[in-house]
Image (cartoon, rainbow, N blue to C red):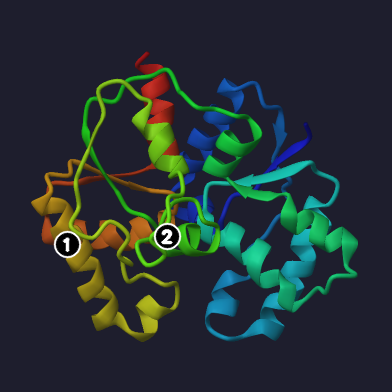
Amino acid sequence: MKVALFIPCYVDQFYPQVGMATVKLLEHFGVEHEFPEAQTCCGQPMANTGCMPEAQPLALKFIDVFDGYDYIVAPSGSCVSMVRNHYETFFDETSERENAVRSRTLELSEFLVNVLKVDRIEGRFDHQVGIHQSCHGLRELRLGASSELMTEIPGMMTDLLGSLDGISFSKLEREDECCGFGGTFAVAEEAVSCMMGEDRIRDHLDSGTRVLTAGDMSCLMHLEGIIRRRKQDIKVMHFAEILAEAIDNR
């Protein structure tokens, strides 16, 4: 397999350890990968704000950079969803090259479960974990079941984490509630965004969460900011960080 690693802007700038954890996981499973240095933003911030013409050059750049790879793997459901579900604004069904890149762009847990067929990871993580199901991964990529559909869909991230020794999970009152981040929504509607985030954290506190995890550092960045300002006792980790740490503790 020829695999490319796509690292979102906020991971690159604020949480590089998530990118390194992703690399560690890929190497653990014997995946040879490349990091194309010409990669840039996927255009999601512009698209979220309704500025699709401004997002289009970034979409074209993404296609040029990642063309020719068997898979493009990213530790971010929202960025992957931007490519897979929202680049259709720029390309139609005749755009074979562009659509091939779009279809090959996968979120990390998707790649591990659907491509590598990983069903168990040997490792240990002795903590109670609260899982935040980010909206893009859940409702656009279908990485798990959402309550409004009332269907059984295997939760890829949850299944991977659940295979670890010593781990336990919080039983939340609202398992798939939005955290309130929503990209530029958190800027335009700061008060609403913060109230939604506080609701999510309260659910985790009430459920005994010690480590809060998700597949999107954008959601976790929002929640971590509230946790830090409230001086609350919850650690925030991307699920790739948990898996990478657990592998070290085999």
State whether residue 176 is above or below residue 86. Answer: above
3D distance between C-alphas at marks 2 and 1 = 17 Å
State whether residue 49 is above or below residue 152. Answer: below
- Which residue is at the front of the view, 161 or 58? 161
Mark 2 near mark 1, Cβ–Cβ under 8 Å? no
Tell me the element at label 1.
helix
| Residue, far left | 206
Considering only order in the chain, which callout, 1 or 2, is on the residue closer to the N terminus?
2
Q: Which mark is residue 5?
A: none
Q: Closer to us: mark 2 or mark 1?
A: 2
| Residue, far front | 151
Tell me where residue 59 sits by quadrant. bottom right
State whether residue 145 is above or below residue 47. Answer: above
Quadrant occupied by the C terminus:
top left
Does residue 241 appear in the picture of this structure?
no
Residue flagged by tag 1: what amino acid is it?
Arg
Residue ID at (40%, 79%) = 185
- Residue underneath mark 1: 229
Quadrant occupied by the N terminus:
top right
Does residue 213 appear in the picture of this structure?
yes
> In the rendered view, does 150 fall on the left or right side of 190?
right
- Residue underneath mark 2: 218
Q: State the image coordinates of residue 35 (x, y, percent, origin top left).
A: 69, 41
Tell me the element at label 2.
helix
Tell me where residue 217 sits by quadrant. bottom left
Residue ID at (63%, 30%) = 116
| Number of marks | 2
Label 1, residues with CA under 10 Å away: few <14, some 14-19, many ≥20: few
- Which residue is at the front of the view, 136 or 54? 136
